Image (tube, helix red, strand yellow):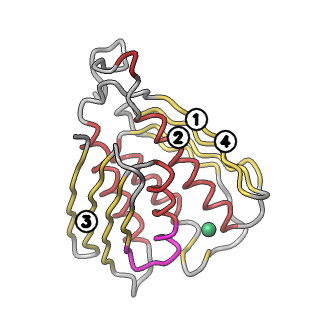
Amino acid sequence: MRTATISRNTKETRISVEINLDGSGAYNVATGVGFFDHMLEQLARHSLIDMTIRAEGDTHIDFHHTAEDTGIALGQAIRQALGNMAGINRYADTHLAMDEALTRCALDVSGRPFLVWDVNFSRDKVGEFDTELFEEFFRAFAMNAGITLHIANLYGSNCHHIAETCFKAVARTLRKAIEIDPRQAERIPTTKGQLGG
Ligand SMILES: [Mn+2]
């Protein structure tokens, strides 16, 4: 079973994450931040990864620690659930359209963490969530999942749409990349013999 459970408790946040990579996109998300919940629900729904996420953070300060630490815990869960990555497609990409906004995601589930973030917002906040925290979330996620993650918003004007296309593009791309390729189901997709080192 490609599942994982992560608990992460610090003085700033208490996070728990349960995932099943081979799920149906069922989700149960409560971070205390409405817009962030909305985005994480998109991530589950469109990746078909089942996700239960609980985050209690120091949101009386701001949402920074909660966003970053949720990214860390979710990334750790993905990495743990992938195990030795045998059989996965590994590479995938998506262009994700939503009304006027178009976002491209390309990723390599390689064990080599990297984030390229080419996304700009014309507003500081969506709902009560700071738009600069999307990058913080995805960086923490990529670093801890061991994924090379490129996200570029090609165009768009509405900040809600731009953010949502980022999460949906990552979801859709992750779905393809972690799916088992029946032509190499037991093999690790590399000539190196292993991924992640
Ligand atoms: Mn929306």
Amino acid type of disc 3? Ser
Residue 69's spot in the image, x, y percent? 34, 64
Region rendered in magenta? 30-38
- Residue bearing mark 3: 16
Give the structural element (helix, strand or loop) at label 1.
strand
In the rendered image of this protein, does residue 89 appear above or below residue 172?
above
- Residue bearing mark 4: 95
Please name whichever residue, 94 or 156, is drawn nearer the observer in this view of the structure: 94
Distance Cα–Cα, label 4 vs label 2: 9 Å
Amino acid type of disc 1? Asp
Q: Residues within 10 Å of mark 2 (few under 14, many from 20)?
A: many
Q: How crowded is mark 4: few (under 14 residues within 10 Å), some or many (20 or more)?
A: some
Q: Is residue 126 magenta?
A: no
Q: How crowded is mark 1: few (under 14 residues within 10 Å), some or many (20 or more)?
A: many
Left or right of 132, for residue 100: right
- Residue bearing mark 2: 173
Residue furthest bottom as drawn: 60
Residue 141's spot in the image, x, y percent? 40, 52
First in sequence: mark 3 or mark 1? Answer: 3
- Residue bearing mark 1: 93
First in sequence: mark 3 or mark 4? Answer: 3
Ligand 1 found in image quarter: bottom right
